[in-house]
Image (tube, rainbow, N blue to C red):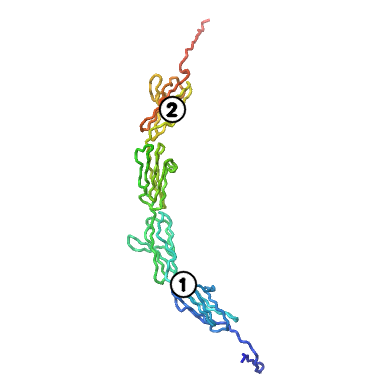
Amino acid sequence: MNPTQMCIFAGMLQLVPGTPSIEPPRVNPFSFLKRWRAGEKTTVTCMVASGTAPMKFIWMKDGKELTEASSVRFKHEQGYSMLFIEPVEVNSGGNYTCVVKNRAGIDSYTTFLDVEASPRWAETPGDQKMAFGSEVKLNCRATGSPPPAVRWERFVEATQAWTKLRAEGERLDIPRVTNNETGRYRCTAVNGVQPDIRHDFLLSIYVPPKILPFHFRKTIKPGENARTTCLVEAGDAPMTFSWLRNGMDATLTKNVHVNTQADFSILNVSPVDATSAGNFTCIVKNKAGFDSFTAYLDVEAPPEWKREPMDKAGVVGNTVRIECLGSGSPSPKMSWHVEREDGLRQAVSEAIPSRATVHANGTLVLHDLDTRDSGQYTCTADNGVAPVLKKTITLKINGKDRRQERAIPIKCNSADSK
């Protein structure tokens, strides 16, 4: 029998062919029943109490439509839909909404999935080694449901006990690390779901380098080898070594060779010559600071000529310059002596005090020459290392001595003479 509608109008009963009514969906309340732990599996069913088919089911989480994934599946049937979550994860917690639609309308119901998960570390610091005075920022970050709280502690050696720090939250800040802040630290994550978790780590300070004093052996002569070792007796790696000679990069000096390892550096001068002498400085650096030590390389080299003096001639009243340049190690002291034609031998500074100048490099300058300045002049270079270096030259002064007076006849007339 076809559906009919009974209509009573104006006291008359008649059958009128009709159409079926369309009823909007109505969703029965549902829930996840309990608090679930991460790793378990759960199912919830969204059932329609009434409504005309066909109906469409949509699942949403926290206001966003869900799609099937590795841990989420749906099963849609006529009149109900099942949501499977396997396994339950920490981020599975939230508001789940079942939305049902048909041509007549829409209905929905929302329930909360409460997930409990014990804390798990997402970020922890390893052992820390810091430069003295540096700033430290360390993170202990944990996940869990409900979100864990993190507390910080430090082990006090004097009391052999853990002491709570004022730091709150996931970060520990130490503005300036000193020896007082070194030691063992612990962060603990707690959210009421057992077990609590702990993480321990060490905080220490880099030790700056300390060089063991070194020296070169005494009495090094040209042609020999000079070697010394810059050894670090304390300090944290990594370390860098550098060498200076008289304040400049030593490796730019000829015959200087450097061999550096993790905690020592060998300087070798091979072969040594007179110019090798000087102050050699080893500098060692690391993150904590630096140290340096200086040793003097003393080369014993007898004097030798850089510019040998030669015979000279001068003119009365003029100036003469005689070069006498010597080298050696240590640097030689230069001096001049004169043996005049009268046989007297004296230091130039004594023989001609007002007109003679001996420069530090050995150059002799004679001013306002006199014929008596002619003679044998000896330049001596002496640095205490045998043999002493000497060279005698002849200085010849030409011209008339201006100090020799000439006789001038003078005629004097008396006022009475006529």
Q: Dot 1: within a 10 Å radius of its alpha carbon, few (fewer than 14), some, or many (20 or more) residues? A: many
Residue 357, quarter of the rendered image:
top left
Q: Nearer the viewer, residue 167 or 231?
A: 231
* Secondary structure state at the residue bearing disc 2: loop
Residue 325 shows which numbered tag? none
Q: Farthest residue in the top direction?
A: 418
Residue 376, horizontal then vertical, whole percent: 41, 23
Query: Which residue is drawn at the image coordinates 60% and 81% (left, top)?
Result: 103
Q: Which residue position holds label 1?
A: 89
Is residue 61 positioned above or below 165 on the image? below
Q: Is residue 325 left or right of residue 98?
A: left
Q: CA distance from mark 1 to mark 2?
A: 98 Å
Is residue 241 positioned above or below 101 on the image? above
Q: Dot 2: within a 10 Å radius of its alpha carbon, few (fewer than 14), some, or many (20 or more) residues? A: many
Identify the amino acid type marked 2: Pro
Residue 343, horizontal then vertical, whole percent: 38, 20
Q: Which residue position holds label 2?
A: 309
- Indicate which disc, 1 or 2, sits on the residue closer to the N terminus: 1
* Secondary structure state at the residue bearing disc 1: loop
Q: Is residue 412 left or right of residue 391?
A: right
Q: Nearer the viewer, residue 35 or 169?
A: 35
The quadrant of the picture occupied by the N terminus is bottom right
Q: Nearer the viewer, residue 416 or 380?
A: 380
Is residue 33 positioned above or below 177 on the image? below
Identify the amino acid type marked 1: Glu
Residue 64, horizontal then vertical, whole percent: 54, 73
Residue 243, horizontal then vertical, whole percent: 41, 45
